[in-house]
Image (cartoon, coloured by chain):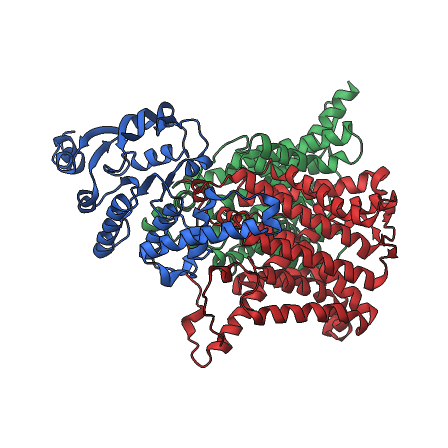
Amino acid sequence: MRYLFKTDYRQDITLWRHRGDLFWYGLLIVVLLLIPYVLSEFYIGELGGVFVFAVAGVGMMLLAGYTGLISLGNAAFLGIGAYTEAILLAHGVPLVVTLPVAGLFTGLFGILIGLPTLRMSGLYLAIATLAFGSIVGTVFQKWDAVTGGFDGFPVPTPDLFGMPVQGANGIYYLSLFVLVVVLWLSANLLRTPLGRAMVAIRDSEISAQSMGIHLARYKTFAFAVSAFITGLAGALFAHYVRYLAPDAFDVLLSVQFVTIVFVGGLGSLHGVIFGALFVRLLPQFIAIIRDDLPFGIGRMPGLEPSLFGFVLVIVILFEPGGIYGRWIKMKNWFQAYPLKRRTSFRRQKSYARSERLR
Amino acid sequence: MEDAARLLQLVVNGAAAGCIYGLIALGFVLIYKATEMINFAQGDIMMLGGFFAFSLIAHFGLNYWIGALLAILLTAAFGFALDAVVLRRVIGQPQFAVVMLTLGLGFIFRAYAGITWGYDSVGFETPFTNRTINLHGLILGQDNVSIIVGTVLLCGVLYLFFSHTRLGVAMQASSQNQLAAYYMGIPVRTVFSLIWAISAGVAAVAGILLSPVSMIDVNMGFLGIKAFAAAVLGGFGSIPGALVGGVVIGIVEQLAGYFLPAGFQEVTSNVVLLATLILRPQGLFAEIAGKRV
Amino acid sequence: MSLFRADDIAIRFGGIRAVDAVSFDVNEGEVFSIIGPNGAGKTTIFNLISRIYQPSSGRLYFQDRDITEIPAYRIAGLGIARTFQNIELFANATLLQNLLIGRHCHSTVGVLSQLVFLPAVRREELQHREKAEEVIAFLGLERYRDTLIANLPYGVRKVVELGRALCIEPKLLLLDEPSSGLNVEETEGMGFWIEDIKKDLGITVIMVEHDMNLVRMVSDRVMALNYGKVIALGTPDEVQNHPEVVRAYIGGEG
């Protein structure tokens, strides 16, 4: 076990705890950069998909995991980002412009949905965002003059500095780049007053207010940032699927984003990556073992969503810390071996926290 | 005159659809009042109730009334077990954990129904199928009328239950103050499970009443989303509010479908929902209070 | 000089007058206690001062400035900090993060510079950290620095909440039942801290408290409330022996 001897306050605000961390993150980046030269195109494509979902997951995590605002409408943000990207590219706007614009434009929608929902508590917010998502989904379907309706919308191949971004590799590198930038921005956010204000709102609105935190401003900010990031993910998603269908951005997709956050582990950026890996790779895993399953379970329609549902239920009931929480516990267990005690990881007994006046 | 009749027809159809929304919303409200949870699987429980009735009536050939009653009881028992086995464990966890949990349960129910009953729409013969009533030239489907009458009867029964029986009063007490109810010797946890049972039973009634109008299928649970609008409009916490909210949503939806261009009908309930939350978050029948420090 | 003044404030909930025509002055550098039976309106006065409730009538003045219309989130910035009766800490954050959230009203850096973590942000973070460490040292919380609040014992949480309020660097500190849930020793320790806060940090304190020993130990003046009305105001001994106060606590013909 490694002991950290802190000698400087600065050690607590760097993004890595010690040189070891820096080394491993560096190594990870190098490996990720080299992977396309090793793996087949299929796996590169899948990893690209993981990155796209991880970006969207970061957007969800900032909102749900750090600010405590649950949204069941983030698929709408993804859709807005995707259509913005595709439509701008179709008008000949270069990628370096469309990508940030897709994010910013979606961010505006985030403010739009954030503002009226400020006064709502968790459950109302979930319902309101669900309604918002379903309205936007209907608009995608019916407003065919812009979105092409059910005929779909082909996404043009973008150019980046004269090079076409295409194929699995192109999407892979583009998504990886955006993911790293988004993670860096979020990590910065979380070590500054902004991020702390979000955490404060999550844990106690009333005392956040007494600490001088303007609830409305920061909640709207959280929505805007979440929508911005999800919009970026949407732009990447457009390139990933290459053909936008209006019914892709439904409640099920929103639930997948929330699943990323829950299964990965609420309140950690590491968790997003774990969650995205899980949500993207589970369907692939099912596809692989599909034919080997007994009783024709593998050919059952609706297997995927039900498995998502099942995993969600299991995680919430038995491991609220998600994969990342489990990972930390396992790490501690090995580091402390053989001194591990049963009580080390026992959950604090929690009682119902009522929002009602009694 | 023809327009007036047409309008009336729309209103009755809307009211019937609205009663279904109202019944699902009633389930939300009962559970919310007691446990501050929202059961996102309420619509799927309705779907299960409908399928139970289908199995009993169409499959085992039971009489409609007996089959329906058994299906209601079966669904209620299912609701009881759901709370006792699963939901009870998450008391005290953040609210959205419960949201996600019930969403996940909904997916599982849908898959289960898909395996058991298949993915095609099914229906069964009811005393109201394809019959009409002629009221001075106004022709109404008995199926729609049966929904309205059934809802009114059910509400009457529930009202009597909550106000006149020991158990009903105990339930009200537990909803208002868990701790005090517990000290008064009310087995609060069992009572909560019973509330889940009632709410599931009500959902089953909705499913059975709905079956002659629109068939039973795996995805009928999505009606639950419209029922949110009903519950919110009614003030989430008010039982008459949920029903009134449902009827209003149902009628507005029908009128929107008639007077507005295509596409609007589908978003009506969601628009009403958002508008309510923005303009009057306490709903029509307010029962909201802020948190105390 | 009076630091804070309540002028004839009142608030009604439904038909109940929770606070009814209450006026008082708090002088700079004193500890001013509010006592009274349950439901007398003590916490309601705190909620009025911290602007969570809007008074039905009356005015509030802080440093001779009318704060009756100022929104709740700006109160901390003016230099008024508070604690809560039932502890409202940020339970899923570490002690250090909680204290740093207390520094929120002193942060001046913009959103974009925070997102890219400019050197100015780093400098300010280090300043906040230094201030938080001062508070940690003052209250002796060093060993809990990186512990999640959810894992701290109740008594420590109470101190952390005090520390978080101190991080605001307030001129006026509102303590809502600082001793509730604490044992005798912890209560006495709380008393010493309140004295230190007054003497060493020069912070004026308004305290709602039930424990008369603590009230007598630290208070310069005491105000007794019953049914939302002031029934006595003076030194701790004067108030404790005031016939109305005795009657309010012990009962009687009223």
- Label tally: 0
Which residue is more in the foreground, C57 or A122?
A: C57
- Name above or below for residue C41 compared with residue B178: above
Q: Colour of chain B?
A: green
Q: As rendered, which of A136 and B13 lies closer to the eye? A: A136
- The chain assigned the colour blue in the figure is C
Farthest residue to the top: give it: B1
Residue visible at 53% across and 66% down in the picture: A17
Residue shown at 87% from the left, 45% from the top = A90
Residue at x-position 57% and y-position 43% = C110
Q: Nearer the viewer, residue C238 or A261?
A: C238
Question: How far from the left and from the top, in percent, is residue C5?
Answer: 31, 28
Image spot of residue B262 (x, y percent): 80, 34
Q: In the image, is A331 to the left or to the right of A49?
A: left
- Determine the colour of chain A: red
Please identify the quarter of the rendering in which residue C248 is found.
top left
* Image quadrant occupied by the C terminus of chain B: top left
Q: Which of A300 and B206 lies nearest the eye of the viewer?
A: A300
